[in-house]
Every structure is written in structure tokens, then in C-alpha cells.
Image (tube, rainbow, N blue to C red):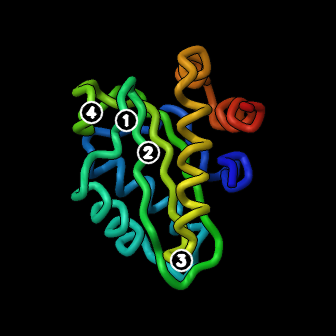
């Protein structure tokens, strides 16, 4: 599944305030909770934190892909935010992060999860694309840019 298939305009936020890794994970979880009525923010946050304990999802170049598996749902949800200022996220290159692509996927869809992660990595490994993401001025512009990515 591609990022464009599971991202909605209300889960695409440009220049969000963020002061710490914990606050960003909470914000990502709260946005996703609005789309997943059977789960609350705390449950979604726990899924992200559980994955972060296994190793950072900060993949370098100012990008992080926090992701968690959730039960009792059949639809994956993506949340994309950029932050006003980069924050320390324990990324593998030790650089701060300002682009976050969060995934919340059904527990039993491991293969789809991996395909979606590959799709995201492919889009965001392009430095020119990341520059455009960082220059977006509003949520709609960010959403449209991602929708047009190949």
C-alpha cells in the first residue's frame, strides 16, 4: 500500500509545534485517534513507544517514520507532519528531525506494513522532494505535494 492511499488532508500538518520526541509522538497519536474511534490516543501512543524501544525510527536526514501495530482495526492510518523547528529524535545520524511520517497498521497485516514502509522510504529518500516538503507553507500544500509524489 502506498502512503498516498492512506493519508488524508486532516492527517497532514505543516509546521506543527514540537519540543520533544514524546510530544511529537503524542501529537501524531492524537491525530490518528480522530480517525480510529475504536482506539484512544494513549493506545496509539503505546504502539509507537513500543516500537521506539526496539530502536529509533529516525532514519536520518531529518526524517522519522514512527510506526505501530494496532489490534481491532482493519484500516491503516498515516499521519504526516513537519515541525516548526527540528527536534532531537535519537535518529541514526544523530541529526534532529523535522519530517515525521507515522503509520498505524492492523496487527495482522505485516506484509502490507512492510510494503508501506518501503513506499515511504522511496519517496522521502529523494533530497529534492524533502526540500519541497520543508518549504510547504500550509497543510493543503503539503498534502498535495505528497499526493503527487511517485
Of pointers 1 and 3, the one earlier in the residue sequence? 1
The dot on residue 108 is 3
Q: Which residue sits at x=61%, y=32%?
A: 123
Task: Check whether the beta carbons of the residues at disc 4 and disc 1 lie within 8 A of each other.
Answer: yes
Reading the image, the residue beneath label 2 is: 65
Q: CA distance from mark 2 to mark 3?
A: 19 Å
SS at mark 4 in the image: loop
Check the image and report above or below for 30 versus 21. Answer: below
Picture quadrant where residue 52 is located: bottom left
Q: Quadrant of residue 59?
A: top left
The reply to whether the C-beta atoms of the residues labelled 1 and 2 are less than 8 Å apart is: yes
Q: Are marks 4 and 3 in contact (CB under 8 Å)?
A: no
Residue 147: % across, % down: 75, 38
Number of the front mark, 4 or 2: 4
Q: Are marks 2 and 3 in contact (CB under 8 Å)?
A: no
Q: Residue at x 69, y 49 (%)?
A: 2
Amino acid at each position: 500500500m502506498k502512503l498516498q492511499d492512506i493519508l488524508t488532508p486532516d492527517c497532514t500538518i505543516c509546521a506543527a509545534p514540537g519540543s520533544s520526541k514524546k510530544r511529537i509522538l503524542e501529537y501524531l497519536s492524537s491525530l490518528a485517534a480522530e480517525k480510529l474511534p475504536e482506539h484512544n490516543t494513549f493506545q496509539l501512543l503505546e504502539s509507537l513507544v513500543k516500537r521506539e524501544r526496539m530502536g529509533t525510527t529516525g532514519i536520518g536526514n531529518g526524517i522519522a517514520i514512527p510506526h505501530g501495530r494496532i489490534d481491532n482495526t482493519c484500516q491503516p492510518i498515516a499521519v504526516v507532519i513537519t515541525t516548526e523547528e527540528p527536534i532531537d529524535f535519537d535518529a541514526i545520524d544523530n541529526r534532529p528531525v523535522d519530517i515525521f511520517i507515522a503509520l498505524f497498521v492492523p496487527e495482522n497485516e505485516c506484509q502490507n506494513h512492510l510494503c508501506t514502509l518501503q513506499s515511504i522510504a522511496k519517496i522521502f529518500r529523494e533530497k529534492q522532494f524533502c526540500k519541497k516538503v520543508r518549504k510547504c507553507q500550509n497543510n493543503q500544500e503539503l498534502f498535495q505535494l505528497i499526493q503527487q509524489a511517485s
